[in-house]
Image: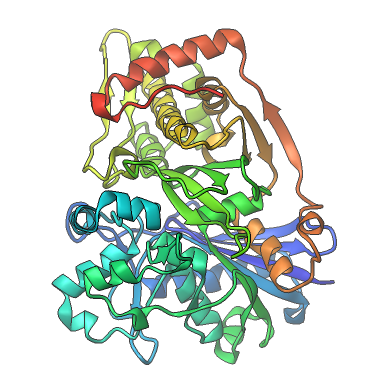
Amino acid sequence: MNYLLGYDLGSSSIKAALLDSATGRCVASATSPAGGRELGMDVPQPGWAEQHPERWWQEVVAATQLLRRHFPFAPGEVAAIGITYQMHGLVLVDKEGQVLRPAIIWCDSRAVDLGNQAFSDLGEAYCLENFLNSPGNFTASKLKWVRENEPQVYARIHKALLPGDYLAYRLTGELQTTVSGLSEGVFWNFKRQAVAQELLDYYSLDAALLPTVVDTFAVQGRLHAEASQALGLAAGTPISYRAGDQPNNAFSLNVLNAGEVAATAGTSGVVYGINETLTADPRSRVNSFVHVNSTHAQPKNGVLLCLNGTGILNSWLRRLVGELPYDELNQLAAQAPVGAAGLRFLPFGNGAERVLENRPSAAGLHGLQFNVHGREHVIRAAQEGIVYALTYGLDIMRDMGVRAQRVRAGHANMFLSPVFREAFVNAGNLTLELYDTDAAQGAARAAGLGAGIYASEAEAFAGLRLLSATEPTPALREQYQAAYADWLTLLAPETQPERRLA
């Protein structure tokens, strides 16, 4: 038997999935920490968020050991390994490969002002035309923050890595990245299809700090002896794919061509649509990155809306109501009517939100009536609020020309809630397709492509199963869109897009 192994390096946990390469079906998966526990985030100051890369590695080892206990397999039966990871983080290593400081992760807001100043000084039109983004709070700006505030650390940097680059380094000993990875850090000039030297020069950052670039789908290295011993896998196993979590989520759902759209609602809430033109939101509320299957001859970009306050809001509510299982939260939400009897939730409370132009923001509960609303209304308002924030981003993407009529998602996280699904399709006037896959399975499938085990994308996706499709209905669409319109009035007037339903 030959298997494909995928690792998903998240900010809450590490997941490993094992696919049978012949059928494309998942035969086993494991998550660490286990038992519903989650990786913590250090918050040295308000708005900051850090994690320790060594902890990531420990959980990768633990997840692999759990996987082997669930489904015993011989070390040599794993034919290839793929990696997906939390985007926009910054891991700094010295010449010996030792981590110099905790990783500054995706929801950390410390570099917002630096990025906004770069956007202004370089010129908004220039940044959007060349980078398709404001430098904002992305990895390049975080590296600039280290240069300005921790010069003793900056002086010792050998390479600046993304989280997935660091995991690949622990597996192979190779310090590498991808073009897609460079774009997620705003290290990439889309117009010139080259490193964004202009931004590096503005920030006084040395381009030599960037790792060697390898193809997304390729044998990028092989498992070295130390890692093979820790994981119980065969030395020499190829690592043949790496991608950030949202491009990978799109890949896992076979979202590869213009007009195709993927969504996820786990730690963050995301809508990710494929576009083949160099278009940008003039206010950089949604962001464009090089998609995993982009080539020099046929560029493809992923336009990404990211909502930070998704999983953290759901877990906060769960703690608030007594640690109920998530399926019971979903059942409670269904007990309240559409629109939650006028209760509205703004789900912005986890760092600066790009969709709000990187402004520091707080969550808000509006319209609360003590003699009307119970916990079921609060839970429903929170789920609807996440949907409305995603719909708000979809409206922006539609203004950019992304054709969002059908959205694919994995059958997981918030999409397990009937209320969430119903609100999503009716507020956005779109069809939702749910598939039996997840990020780790997507990374495993992609590793098969990168290693040449699959000869084509069609062959790689032969095992992907559609579980359900949900369509909007006229009566519910009217109710949800009225509630959404009311939700929009809670945002500042200048943030409101024109409604352009599919």
Residue at image point 61% right, 19% down: 472
Residue 313's quadrant in the figure? top left
Vertical comparison of 470 with 120: above or below: above
Viewport quadrant of the C terminus: top right
Residue 210's quadrant in the figure? bottom left
Where is residue 101 drawn, in percent x and y?
27, 76
Residue at image point 26% right, 20% down: 366
Q: Say whether residue 354 is visible.
A: yes
Where is residue 308 drawn, in percent x and y?
36, 44
Vertical comparison of 332 with 237: above or below: above
Q: What is the number of callouts on the image? A: 0
Residue at image point 55% right, 12% down: 476
Q: Say whether residue 107 is visible.
A: no
Q: How is the image coloured?
A: rainbow
**Left or right: where 83 falls relative to 57:** right
Where is residue 264 drawn, in percent x and y?
53, 43
Residue at image point 52% right, 76% down: 168
Q: Nearer the viewer, residue 372 or 410?
A: 410
**Left or right: where 163 falls relative to 122:** right
Q: Nearer the viewer, residue 194 or 340?
A: 194
Vertical comparison of 502 with 91: above or below: above
**Left or right: where 309 falls relative to 325:** left
Vertical comparison of 74 with 494: above or below: below
Viewport quadrant of the N terminus: bottom right
Residue 155's quadrant in the figure? bottom left
Q: Nearer the viewer, residue 412 or 317?
A: 412
Where is residue 50 drawn, in percent x and y?
30, 63
